[in-house]
Image: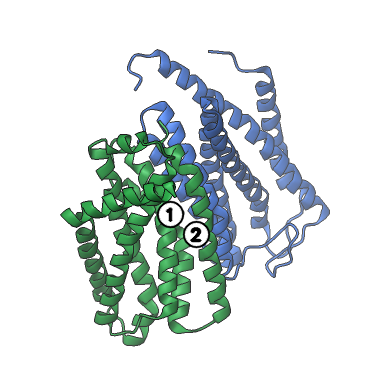
Amino acid sequence: MKRTPKLLIFLDVISALGLIGALLLVFLFTPVEKTMGLVQKVFYFHVASTWMGMLGFLLATVASIGYLRTKNLDWDAAAIAGVEIGMVFVLIGIITGSIWARPIWNTWWTWDPRLTTTLIMELIYAAYFILRSNLGEIRQRARLSAVYAIAGFITVPLTFVSIRIFRSIHPVIIGGSSSGMFSMSGNMLITFVSSLAAFTIFFASVFWHRYILERDQRAVNLQSPEED
Amino acid sequence: MKFIKAVYAIFSKDLINEKRTFETLGSMLVFALIVVLIFLFSFDLSVGLRKEAASGIIWVTLCFAGTLSLDRTMALERETEAIDALRMAPYDATVIYFAKVLGNWFFLLVVAGIVVAAYALFGNVMLFTGGFIAILLMGTFGYILIGALVGALNMQIRSRGPLLSVLLFPLLIPLLLAAVNASSLVLTGNDPAGLRTWVGMLAGYDLLFLAAGIMLYNKILDE
């Protein structure tokens, strides 16, 4: 077992500082939104954690393609790291979104394209975990779950487009002009970008940790005699 | 040409097998009819609503019934390790994929015909229109394209349980959405522009998963 890389420890520290900094910006620096009030502040972490989750799913798909091409099990470790982080942070995104939606839309949930697509995505990757846990042999598990991850990822944009055909009420913050949109003042934008940056660094560090864990776990399993 | 012959060989093997046992179609048909009846009983719809609900009920029924044949067709190959023999043939695994797609599509279409007829009969609504049949063909084809892929994946799981539907259904949601909406629009005759959009979605889904199936299937069987 190797020691934790220096760069990773550095990343850990930076992401801890970044998250604290983003939190301070959200609560002390940013003005309270005029019509929505305090609950709007959940937005900074809502977007950032959903972004982090999506990044996880995207990297998992890239890693799955990488595994099928190279048959190198390190890609599989990256895929599982991506999916796990994606599951957790998209779930955080859904929950924080619901907290925001309750006072603003007057409902916890609505069948909007983005909401529905993220929910279905969670179901797809939940199925991915079920598949993984039912496969014992390490190469077979890596291969089949890679295929499933790719097939699952293909359906995500399709789900989005097909539900988009129904009318959407989710606000489009960047580069859109739907009716539910609110505009950000300068300070809000600074906070928004900072929390995105903080979560991205946080992502890099969590991803790296999970990747190392999976790789080491595999190495340990290979040494033990009961490995199947 | 050799490719088509090989596909046809596996396809006709599955058909002969089915002709002798009638296991897959038999259980699919009985199951599908029961599901349709349960829907009709549990909703007890008026005639007008029965037509609107037709597409939803029929698609859900087909979705459930389809898993039976997808499960069975690969279980047959696994039970006697026949899949190894198939893999030994000097062909790409894509041959097996196409043969399984054709076989399962055939079964599902037989079931679909009977389900639609049963719904039309019990529900007293007219369903056999050209547009509806075309959407049934497109939708079931897409379903089988992804189903055959997941079926082959499911075959390799040692403790095969009710896992096929858990793996399959999340991937089917966009297809089902398009199929249900397209068929209900074609049956009610409202909103031709919306109908075109949904049919386009169906076609896109079919093409995308045809490509994905061809690329991914031999990865699944690749030992």
With B159 as the anchor, is B55 left or right in this view?
right
Circle 1/circle 2 CB separation < 8 Å: yes
Instruction: Tally the numbered discs.
Output: 2
With A181 as the anchor, is A99 left or right in this view?
left
- Palette colour of chain B: green
Residue picked out by circle 1: B145
From mark 1 to mark 2, how far is it between C-alphas?
A: 7 Å
- Palette colour of chain A: blue
Asked if both marks, 1 and 2, belong to the same chain, the answer given is: yes
Q: Quadrant of the C terminus of chain A?
A: top left
Residue for point 59% across, 71% down: A167
User: Which SS class for mark 1?
Assistant: helix
Which amino acid is tagged 1? Answer: Leu
* Residue A90: mark in rendering: none
Task: Note whether residue A111 is visible.
Answer: no
State the residue lying farthest toward the right: A186
- Comparing B117 with A101, the one in front is B117
Q: Is the residue B51 above or below the residue B74 in the image? A: below
* Residue B206: mark in rendering: 2
> Where in the figure is residue A177, as x and y percent of width and height?
74, 66
- Comparing A74 with A66, the one in front is A66
